[in-house]
């Protein structure tokens, strides 16, 4: 969700989404597809990918949803220190997976506001540093492996 919103907001930037515990090849959940469709973003063909060292090497900025993700990313890829930041400046973004539409909407609102703040920050920095079109940005979605929950739900 975050990568798609940031990519829409900063069309010249290279924005990728990858997870720490991604179920590789899994599509986005239907609630996220529906929410982003309302913003004109087609996420139907999105498939989950696992974050790799080369992705981290190439990224100028990596945005994560939680402190735990930041810690895990630093553990697995210590060279990412200094370029991994929380998406939300107010703390962790709650994972709505398996919860009500209200939870998805609440997470979407937090992510949307946070993306707008990051986009403004990146645009203002581009007058001093490389332009936003030269930036490589990685977004790590919630790092929880939801395959067990999907199996229980019969998905």
Image: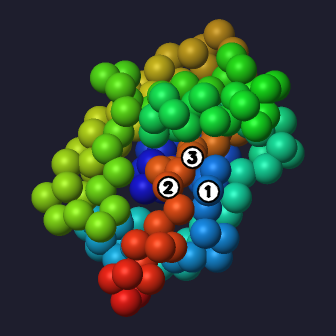
Callout 2 touching callout 3 (CB < 8 Å): no
Q: Residue at x 51, y 34 (%)?
A: 68
Residue carrying label 2: 144
| Residue 13 x/y as whole percent | 63, 42
Q: How is the image coloured?
A: rainbow
In the depicted view, which residue is nearer to us: 86 or 6? 86
Q: Residue at x 57, y 76 (%)?
A: 26
| Residue 154 x/y as whole percent | 37, 89
Secondary structure state at the residue bearing disc 1: loop
Image position of 109 with respect to 134: above or below: below
Determine the CA span between mark 2 and mark 3: 11 Å
Say which label, 3 or 1, has the lower sequence index.
Answer: 1
Say which label, 2 or 1, has the lower sequence index.
Answer: 1
In the depicted view, which residue is nearer to us: 85 or 96? 96
Q: Which mark is residue 45?
A: none
Q: Residue at x 33, y 83 (%)?
A: 153
Considering the image in quadrants, where does the N terminus appear? bottom left
Say few, some or many: other residues with alpha carbon within 10 Å of mark 1 (under 14 / 14 to 19 / 20 or more): some
From this viewpoint, which residue is outermost toward the bottom? 154
Residue carrying label 3: 140
> Relative to residue 65, is residue 85 drawn left or right?
right
| Residue 117 x/y as whole percent | 37, 27
Determine the CA span between mark 2 and mark 1: 6 Å
Q: Nearer the viewer, mark 3 or mark 1?
A: 1
- Quadrant hosting residue 35: bottom left
In the depicted view, which residue is nearer to us: 57 or 51? 51
> Relative to residue 52, is residue 102 drawn left or right?
left
Callout 2 touching callout 1 (CB < 8 Å): yes
Secondary structure state at the residue bearing disc 2: loop
Say few, some or many: other residues with alpha carbon within 10 Å of mark 2 (under 14 / 14 to 19 / 20 or more): some
Residue carrying label 1: 21
């Amino acid at each position: 969700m975050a990568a798609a919103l940031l990519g829409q907001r900063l069309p010249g930037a290279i924005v990728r989404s990858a997870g720490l515990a991604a179920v590789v090849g899994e599509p986005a959940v239907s609630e996220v597809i529906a929410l982003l469709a309302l913003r004109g973003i087609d996420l139907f063909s999105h498939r989950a990918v696992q974050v790799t060292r080369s992705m981290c090497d190439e990224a100028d900025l990596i945005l994560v949803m939680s402190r735990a993700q930041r810690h895990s990313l630093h553990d697995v890829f210590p060279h990412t220190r200094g370029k991994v930041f929380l998406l939300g400046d107010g703390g962790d973004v709650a994972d709505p997976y398996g919860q009500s539409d209200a939870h998805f909407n609440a997470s979407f609102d937090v992510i949307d506001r946070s993306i707008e703040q990051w986009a403004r920050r990146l645009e203002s920095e581009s007058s001093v540093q490389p332009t936003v079109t030269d930036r490589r940005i990685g977004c790590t979605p919630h790092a929880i492996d939801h395959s067990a929950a999907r199996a229980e739900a019969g998905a």
